[in-house]
Structure formats: C-alpha cells, structure tokens
Amino acid sequence: MEFLDKLFAQQSYDKNNFFLIAGPCVVESESLVMEVADKVSTICRNLGIPYVFKASYRKANRTSAGSFTGIGDDSGLELIKKVGDTYRLPTTSDIHAHDEAAPAARFVDILQIPAFLCRQTDLLIAAAETGKVVNVKKGQFLSGPSMKFAVEKIKKAGNESIILTERGTTFGYQDLVVDYRNIPWMQEQGAPVVMDCTHSLQQPNQTSGVTGGNPQLIGTIAKAAIAAGANGLFIETHPNPAVAKSDGANMLRLDLLQGLLEQLVKIRKVVADF
C-alpha cells in the first residue's frame, strides 16, 4: 500500500512488520507527549516497527460533562505537530465534525474518524478532501463488511489513502467483544486494517460517569490480532494510567509496552512464514 510507504518514509523499519499507532489518549501537557513519543519511538526503532504518534487534541465524546476534554484545540494541535517535527514521526488525532477536518489537517498526517461517527457522510467527505490519510474506526454497532460504505464515500471524494480500524462490537450495555473475522473482511476493501487493542477493552456507560476497562487483556487482544493478520495495532499508552485525564482504565502502562511489542514481533515473523 503505497501511501503507507510515503507515511513512513522518514523511518527505517522492517517492511514485513506491522505498524503501530500509539500515544496517550489526550494531550495533557507537553512533558507527557514528549516523554511518550521519545520512549515509544526508541522502542519501535529498535524493533523495526513503523510508528505513528497518536493523541487527541480534544475529547468530544465523554460520558460525563465534568470529564477532561483537552488543553485547548490550538495548543493541543501545536503540541502534536511539535512531536512529529521533533521525532520525525507521522501523527494522528481524531476529528468530530466536518469543519474540524481542514484545520486539523494542517497539523497531523492522519485524520481519525471516531467509531460513533463512522457513518457521518459530511465528516468523511471533509476528511477525504484534505488529502490526508483517513483512518475510520468501525462503529461498535457495525459489522466489518458494512464498512465498505465508509470506504466508498472517501474514495468518491477522491481519496484512496484509507485505513480501517477494528475496535470491538457492543455486547450488552456495558461491554464490548472483538470479532476477529472483521480483520480479513475489512481488508477485502483494499485498506490496511488496524486493531485497536485498548478501546476494544472499554466498559462504557458506567454509572460512575467514567468509562471502565480491562487493560490486563491488551496483550491478548494484540496477539490475537497479529495472528489474524492485522496490518497495524493501535495502543494508547501512558506512564501512569491511574492519573491519566482520559481513558486511564484501558491504557497500557508505558513501561509494559516494550515487552509486549517484542512478543508481537516474534508472532508476526511466525505468521509471515505461513
């Protein structure tokens, strides 16, 4: 997929490896995003994994009105761009409305479409028209094959640089389940498919007003995804998830990332032999 080669042109990596989208859930401070980018980029460089830095400049989808949403759009986007420039990394952040696409595209390389918004035609078209790579997360309410319609909307707007992300399917009111059939099904659309290993473990709609999660299963989700042939992984990570301002309940502790990625690289090599 030629657009991925261009995206990772400044990195040296194993062409047979999966790629990684990783970072904290939201931009909390400059020190946080720089610490995460520095550590993750070093790990990925040593393991030959192409890496995209991820952080949300604003969180629009919060359970409670009192939840942290960001440090301000301009400040958040500027810090994401600074990370990309400093570490020579492609970057991504999510957008929530069609009028956010063009402003965000000035700062990031990939525009991420949140799962709940994956059917929003105006949003998909606006993202496509920026010319940036568009990563669409599969809605928790959709099957993998039904994502062909999101792909069609983006392509019709003149953009062929599309990533699709699996992030679980609603399973009752407060849980998700992962159907790994969605990985090959979505790959049939000609797009690389990413497994979101952290959001797929969310336990949404908790009565506390804070989303829960099962971070102890991140490794299980990631290993199964690589075995199923996923092109990339999405892992939110934080030095201390217990004090994170968003999604701390399902982020991977930063010091656990290297060991997990080392295991995943080994699995990828085995899978590649089949």
Image (tube, rainbow, N blue to C red):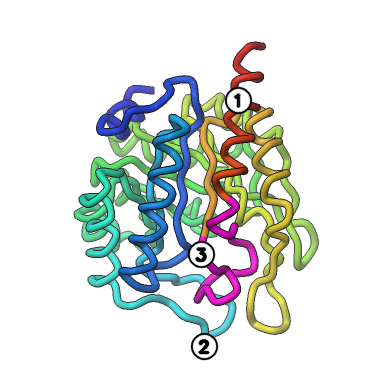
Q: Residue at x 30, y 44 (%)?
A: 89
Q: What type is the residue that disc 3 sits on?
A: Pro
Could you say which is closer to the camera, residue 105 or residue 24? 24
| Location of residue 143 with respect to 250 vertically, above or below | above
Return the x and y of residue 109 as percentages of the image width and height.
28, 46
| Location of residue 69 with respect to 146 vertically, above or below | below
Q: Pointer 2: what residue?
A: 66
| Location of residue 8 with respect to 172 vertically, above or below | above
Q: What type is the residue that disc 1 sits on?
A: Arg
**Boundaries of the magenta span:** 238-256
Mark 1: secondary structure: helix
Is 135 positioned to the left or the right of 224 in the image? left
| Location of residue 77 with respect to 4 vertically, above or below | below
Q: Earlier in the sequence, mark 3 or mark 2?
A: 2
Q: What is the distance, in whole Å, between disc 3 and disc 2 at their CAs?
A: 23 Å
Is 113 positioned to the left or the right of 71 in the image? right
Q: Residues within 10 Å of mark 3 (few under 14, many from 20)?
A: some
- Whether the residues at callouts 1 and 2 have beta carbons within 8 Å, the answer is no
Does 130 appear in magenta?
Answer: no
Quarter of the image where one finds residue 23: bottom left
Q: What type is the residue that disc 2 sits on?
A: Gly
Q: Pointer 1: what residue?
A: 268
Q: What is the distance, in whole Å, between disc 1 and disc 3 at their CAs?
A: 26 Å
Q: What is the distance, in whole Å, between disc 1 and disc 2 at their CAs?
A: 42 Å
Residue 23 seen anywhere in this rendered image of the structure: yes
Quarter of the image where one finds residue 48: top left
